[in-house]
Amino acid sequence: MSKISNNYGINNNNYYYEQRSDLEKELGWVLATTASGLIYKSLPSFSNPFLKQMSKEHANNHLYKDVFIKAVENSGLKEKGLKLIHEANPQTDIGRGLNACFVPATKEIRLNAEKATISGFHELGHAMNNMKGGWGKFLQKLRGPGYAIAGLMGSIALLSRNKPKGEKRDLKDLILDNSGKIAFAAMLPTVIEESMASYKGVKMAREAGLAEPLVNNLKKFYKKALLSYGGYAIVTGLAVYATSKIMEKFTRPKKIEY
Ligand SMILES: [Zn+2]
């Protein structure tokens, strides 16, 4: 154990700050990574409802397929270069009909058209966001950086806190202290863009003539998809928050009064 001198050193107030031992810091690291791992284990409970309904909907594909093709025609995006790619490779989630995606770089909607056209309207919503510009496109552009920032916060939260609690905070300290909130906030643009894509998708499905009971089912399904995105943001925020608090507890210099 060593006393911190100079910067935060011994002063006239009957206390001093003591550096934490390497052992304490290592213990903090182990606990923090374990806690974060346990929190991430709750992720499937957010994504399972979606996956479950997705598999169930394979049998109903015929109810959605023609309307989906019509919605794509109605969107006017084909004229702007939108392509539909049928993917049936059983090695991929998309090929198995468990996922679908819109690829901004190539303007492609990729899905298994024999199983998963129920997902297509939402992807068409992403295509709208991307190809019509506006807020949707802006939020879409924040997706990559947002996830990178969230990942970075996960690493930053694991750093040792060398500054005592009462000391003046600089920008670096503020980032360290708020890493959980920053990670969560960085993922929010994606959650919002996802809900916009669903909203537009449902609207286009209705306009293309999807029967109201099926529209309702579509909404239910897309809510579950949003739950998986929202859950990912919440779980990431909590995992980073827990990491940060544990590291703080085990590495921040201790105030010793005498
Ligand atoms: Zn989406």
Image (tube, rainbow, N blue to C red):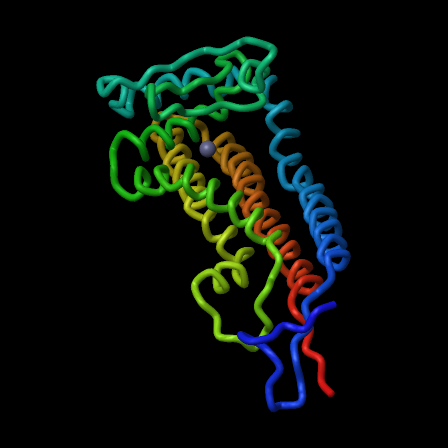
Q: In the shown orientation, is residue 257 left or right of residue 235? A: right
Which residue sits at x=60%, y=52%? 240
Of the pair 129 and 91, the residue shown nearer to us: 91
Quadrant in which the C terminus appears: bottom right
Quadrant in which the N terminus appears: bottom right
Give the quarter of the image for residue 145.
top left
Question: Residue 110 in the image: x percent, y percent?
Answer: 44, 18
Q: In the shown orientation, is residue 149 left or right of residue 3? A: left
Question: Residue 218 in the image: x percent, y percent?
Answer: 50, 33
Of the pair 53 and 41, the residue shown nearer to us: 41
Compared with 88, 242 (above or below) is below
Of the pair 131 and 248, the residue shown nearer to us: 248
Instruction: Work out which residue is located at the far left of the displayed protein and give it.
Output: 79
Question: Residue 3 in the image: x percent, y percent?
Answer: 67, 73
Compared with 233, 132 (above or below) is above
Compared with 159, 115 (above or below) is above
Total numbered badges shown on the rendered structure: 0
